[in-house]
Amino acid sequence: LGEFDSYLKKKNIKHVFIYPRCPKINAYIERQNRTLQDEFVDTNEDLILTSVDEFNKKLIDYLLWYNCQRPHKSLNNLSPIDFIIKHCLKNYPKECKMYVTYTNS
């Protein structure tokens, strides 16, 4: 067993698979995978073969940009983090807003 499978077995977690390329079954994840493929992987394919570390560093930068800066039409042109801060955290008690990532005073 691989490390991931061993961890699941140790924690008694059942790993459930869905049919590949079935966007109706798991639409949000399938769309995220397509966006990641189109916007990042396709333009950085050469790094996978030459420098996995560099690929992973660029992937982290992309994901931070995607979630913290990139406007999303489905979120009224807010980034996901801005949407969460604006709409999800506004009614939480003050102590819930004490995370390092929460930057609104």
Image: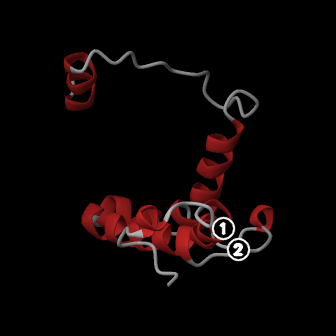
Residue at the disc numbered 1 = 83
Which of the two residues, 89 or 71, is positioned nearer the viewer here? 89
Residue pictured at 33% horizontal, 59% vertical: 49
Crowding at label 1, few (<14), some or many (≥20) Cα neighbours within 10 Å?
Answer: some
Q: State the image quarter where residue 22 is shown.
A: top right
Q: Image check: 88 left or right of 45?
A: right
Q: Nearer the viewer, residue 24 or 21?
A: 24
Which residue is the site of mark 2? Answer: 78
Circle on res. 3: none
Instruction: Name which quarter of the figure residue 2 lies in.
Output: top left
Say which quarter of the image contains residue 81.
bottom right
Q: Return the residue nearer the eye: 96 or 80.
A: 96
In the rendered view of the protein, which quadrant contains the N terminus? top left
- Specify the color scheme: secondary structure
Q: What amino acid is at disc 2?
A: Leu
The residue under the point 63% across, 75% down is: 70
Task: Kindly tell me whether residue 1 is visible in this rendering.
Answer: no
Find numbered disc 2 in the image and state the secondary structure of the residue it sits on: loop
Does the residue at mark 1 contact the one at mark 2 (Cβ under 8 Å)? yes
Residue 77 lies, in percent from the top left, at 76, 74
Q: Position of residue 33 (x, y in %)?
A: 59, 48
